[in-house]
Amino acid sequence: MRQFAFVVLFNLLLLSVLILAIEGVARVAHLMEEAPEVVVAERMHTRYDELLGWAVVPRVTVPNMYGTGAHVSITDRGFRGTVELANPVPEGVIRIVCSGDSFTFGHGVGDEDTCCARIGRVPGFESVNMGQGGVRRRSDVSVVRPGWHIRPPHSAFRVHR
């Protein structure tokens, strides 16, 4: 009887080890499968740039990106908003250049509700929203764009969380 119990126990242990080995092989095989690409909403208006990191795609409008009426629009020059700005700055206008991360870009709000757009509604001012999700302080080189110069009395500010 004792020998029978030992054989049963040994076989159960052997079966458990075999099941665990099969489970382990199955998990490894599953991890090696090609994972499906996750679609991120921001990919509708951004692309990866080798020099700058993430950058907006010019001439893009994503209707209702953040809810009804909360559109994301990118101008021909790659700035968030719907208004193309004159170059050079019109006489009597102070241009504010907003540079920073997704907070500056206005992640979660429509074009007219970004902090930069609100600054641009103040009489005598206009604003350029150069915010970009994923930007860090060290990558603010993206502020430099050909043909755009910041001179007094014009200002630039950076916002990072």
Image (spheres, helix red, strand yellow):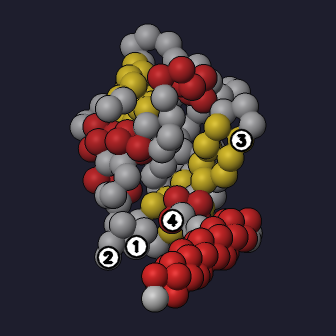
Q: Is residue 1 above or below residue 68?
A: below
Left or right for 62, reference 52? left
Camera-nearest label, 1 or 3:
3
**Marking on residue 41:** 4
Circle 3 sits in a helix, a strand or a loop, which is it? Answer: strand
Image coordinates for residue 55, horizontal then vertical, percent:
62, 44
* Disc 4/disc 3 C-alpha distance (Å): 18 Å
The amino acid pointed to by label 1 is Asn
Of residues 18 and 46, which is closer to you in this image? 18
- N-term mark: 4 or 3: 4
Give the labeled residue for mark 3.
Answer: 49
Residue 155 appears in the picture as rendered? yes
Mark 4, Cα crowd under 10 Å, few <14 / some 14-19 / many 20+, is: few
The amino acid pointed to by label 3 is Asp
Contact (CB < 8 A) between labels 4 and 2? no
Give the labeled residue for mark 1.
Answer: 64
Outermost residue on the top side: it is 152
- N-term mark: 1 or 3: 3
Residue 160 lies in quadrant:
top left
**Residue at x 36% of width, y 66% of height:** 66
Give the labeled residue for mark 2.
Answer: 68
Circle 1 sits in a helix, a strand or a loop, which is it? Answer: loop
- N-term mark: 4 or 2: 4
Of residues 33 and 74, which is closer to you in this image? 33
Camera-nearest label, 1 or 4:
4
Left or right for 119, reference 72? left
Quarter of the C terminus within the rendering: top left
Circle 2 sits in a helix, a strand or a loop, which is it? Answer: loop
